Image (tube, grey):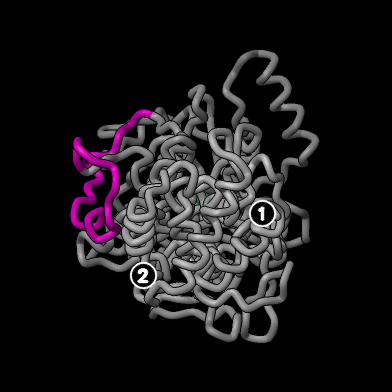
Amino acid sequence: MVRVRFAPSPTGYLHIGGLRTALYNELFAQRHGGVFVLRIEDTDRTRYVEGAVENLLRTLAWAGVTPAEGPYLADDGSIKERGDHGPYVQSARLDKYQAAAADLLAKGAAYRCFCSPERLEEVKKAQAAAKQPMIYDKLCRALPPADAAARAEKGEPHVLRMRMPDSGATMFTDAIRGDVSFENVLVDDQVLMKTDGYPTYHLANVVDDHDMQITHVIRGEEWLPSTPKHIVLYLALGWTPPTFAHLPLLLNADRSKLSKRQGDVAVEDYKNKGYLPEAMVNFVALLGWNPTADREVYEKRELAEAFDLGKINKAGAVVSMDKLNWLNREYLKAMPMEEIGRRAEPFFVESGILKREGDKVVSAATGAAVGDMIARAAELEKRRVDTLAQLPEATAFLFSGPLTYEQDALVGKKSDAQVAKARLEGLLTFLADLAPEAWATAKTLEEPVIAHIAAQGWTNGESLWPFRVALTARAQSPSPFEVAWALGKDKTLSRIQDALRTLA
Ligand code: GLU
């Protein structure tokens, strides 16, 4: 049975690369009817960030990436765990690492190292000066184990290091990169247990992947150089290593390594900017893989059906904001208006254009309940924005109180005030009497209004220009039919009346 895991360290936020790793693990599990596990790797106490786990769980839930085992946020906001291989947080598993460390020590696969941080620093400096690889010089390997044990017994601070073989190479077949080989002498005698009694990532990761019966380790390329250490540890502990798959690096548009400086790297930032989780998932899925050659919009189900580690690129994947914006627009366009309205509401409240009053949402300007006008506003502008967060500003004029008009703007270049006034009066009467069904869509409004204009012998220009400006007070906007539909009958009529007062 396939078992995979996402094993983030809770450093404060979920990186876009982390979301891709989590997603690929989930897709792989779905593809093979396996289990996707979440494990929190919090053994580095110096990097501990308060609230980071909650934040991570919330962001994964927002993206719809759902581990079957591991910590999750319960409805009451507390962190709970599910699954039979727990605990899933490394700080609650210290006894397991200590047992593995004792085993490695007894087998001679690990040794105690008493070198001070100052000595290690000097060794590094000398190696840097001599342009040698900066790895531990193995001084404490030579200590007779009994002497080392006696020093440790007396309380002398020390770490536990792994003993890398002195010759040969560690080889493995990466599911993405193919055969990979590392010369053992160039691999560091990695610290496994720190002076604080906590394991390092390397030991804890191997122990947990074994204990949680992980079959495939799918993770970022930055962990590739650690893999020979892990394989040596598996073998020393008498365990079978899992299959490894290292995902390509994420790059900025200029092909440098993705950095905060060139844009957002935290998934939360994209969420706050109004990207849809569906678009985000689609976007990160395509960072290094495309299931087909002919399209880019995929439902998650399709991604899971097509997922194949062997088809993932080895080369770095460029994170393109243009592509993300394009995908987000595709999802916005296809989304039913009630759904966008529901998702856009927090952005309207955040912008200050709307506010919550009890269980109602009201216009901050007028205090009037907006009801389903948010959905119509979203529908009105959804083809013209990249993100949900751009909707409030684009549609603010719908929610405002009475508009102020410039007479010239209302009349338009090709007409005069008298004609504009007459047309607005005519439209006001016509719209007031129009059957309620006509307000169902912009189209059902447009047809009778255009027919009426023609029947009256008016021109479209002299009628529709003042109509549109009466509803928007803007030089540019969607058509008057779209805006009238979004405003609804009452607000449409009252804006025409306000505009007529300007022309009086
Ligand atoms: N804790 C590591 C990280 O933060 C996990 C690496 C791995 O998947 O082995 O990325």
Q: Quadrant of residue 57?
A: bottom right
Q: Which mark is residue 277?
A: none
Residue that protrudes farthest toward the right in the picture = 118
Q: Label 2 amino acid?
A: Ala
Nearer to me, 52 or 363: 363
**Helix, strand, or loop for circle 1?**
loop
Q: Is residue 310 left or right of residue 77?
A: left
**Helix, strand, or loop for circle 2?**
helix
From the top left corner, tell me how far across and down residue 494 is, in percent.
61, 68
Q: Is residue 195 magenta?
A: no
Mark 2 nearby-residue class (10 Å; few <14, some 14–19, many ≥20): some
Q: The magenta stretch spans which residues?
A: 292-315
How many badges with numbers are in the image? 2
Q: State whether label 1 is within 8 Å of ligand 1.
A: no
Q: Is residue 207 left or right of residue 334?
A: right
User: Could you tell me if the residues under marks 2 and 1 are in contact, i.e. CB atoms within 8 Å?
Assistant: no
Q: Which mark is residue 438?
A: 2
Q: Is residue 298 magenta?
A: yes
Residue 237 visible here: no
Residue 170 visible here: yes
Counting residues from the start of the chain, the first of labels 2 and 1 encountered is: 1
From the top left corner, tell me how far across and down residue 493 is, in percent.
56, 68
**Comparing labels 2 and 1, the label whose residue is closer to the camera:** 2
From the top left corner, tell me how far across and down residue 83 is, in percent.
40, 79
Nearer to me, 227 or 320: 320
Instruction: Name the residue beneath numbered marker 1.
Output: 194
